[in-house]
Image (spheres, rainbow, N blue to C red):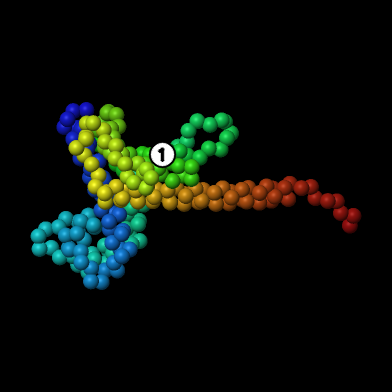
Amino acid sequence: MSNEDKNRAKDQARAQLDSIVAMVNRLEHCQNCDGEDCELSSAEIYEGLSLSHSEGDEATDEEKEEYHDEDVVRQSISEDPLEISVRSGWHSPGEENEADEYLVLLCTGGPAVRITGSLGAYGEPEDAKLEYQDWFTPWERYCNTTSEEGEAKMEMPEDIKVESLTEQQTRKLNELKAWIYRQRVKHRKEKQRGERREQRQAKEEAKAEELNTSPAQSSFF
């Protein structure tokens, strides 16, 4: 990867990280502010809504209301990843195995950015690694945060040693990991409910088929 391509990919990784922080900041603000007497500037509201702001622009009442709509914020966070996947390690055939790794694809193409990490015994993310790549190049790590005894541990690769996460960014990334875990639990429960519905439907169909194919009893009249 040329230095130009590498810088472009790293810039995209940084942009994705900044976007995550902005969305979580907005969510936290909505949870603590109903919009009345809000101290946010119009520029901050425009930024939260991903709108272009010029000097002198004032946020309208509709824009302020949209910014403080917690449901809209949660939907934006849920729809931001292109894909969320999990996978499990080696296990014997027929043996049920829980996933031990997750992947959140943030953007694809050239450049592409993703978050990968490992899952704990209860399916919760244990770490998060932000990775980037450009066309036909291997994935490279932007940064890694690992929770260890309640504190964030930073592991930086040599080629980007100057890069670092602030305490706030680390906290936001940990919050994203918690959100991934909640989404995984939600999808697992929905899958289990769907499987139970399919089983009930299969039983009902089998019973109906049995009744339809049962020979009619002879009548003496």
Nearer the observer, 153 or 165: 153
Q: Quadrant of residue 26?
A: bottom left
Residue 75 at x, y percent in the picture = 35, 56
Q: Nearer the viewer, residue 80 or 171?
A: 171
Residue positioned most to the left: 55
Residue denoted by label 1: 118
Q: How crowded is the residue under tag 1: few (<14 C-alpha within 10 Å), some, or many (20+)?
A: some
Q: Residue 175, percent across and down? A: 35, 51
In the image, 128: left or right of 198? Answer: left
Q: In the rendered view, would you say 217 is above or below 93?
A: below
**Total numbered badges shown on the rendered structure:** 1
Residue 125's place in the image compared with 37, above or below, is above
Residue 84 seen in render: no
Tell me the quarter of the image containing the N terminus: top left
Quick one: which residue is furthest to the right in this view? 220
Q: Quadrant of the C terminus?
A: bottom right
Q: Residue 91: x percent and y percent?
A: 53, 31
Q: Residue at x 22, y 34 (%)?
A: 160
Identify which residue is drawn at 50% across, 40% down.
98
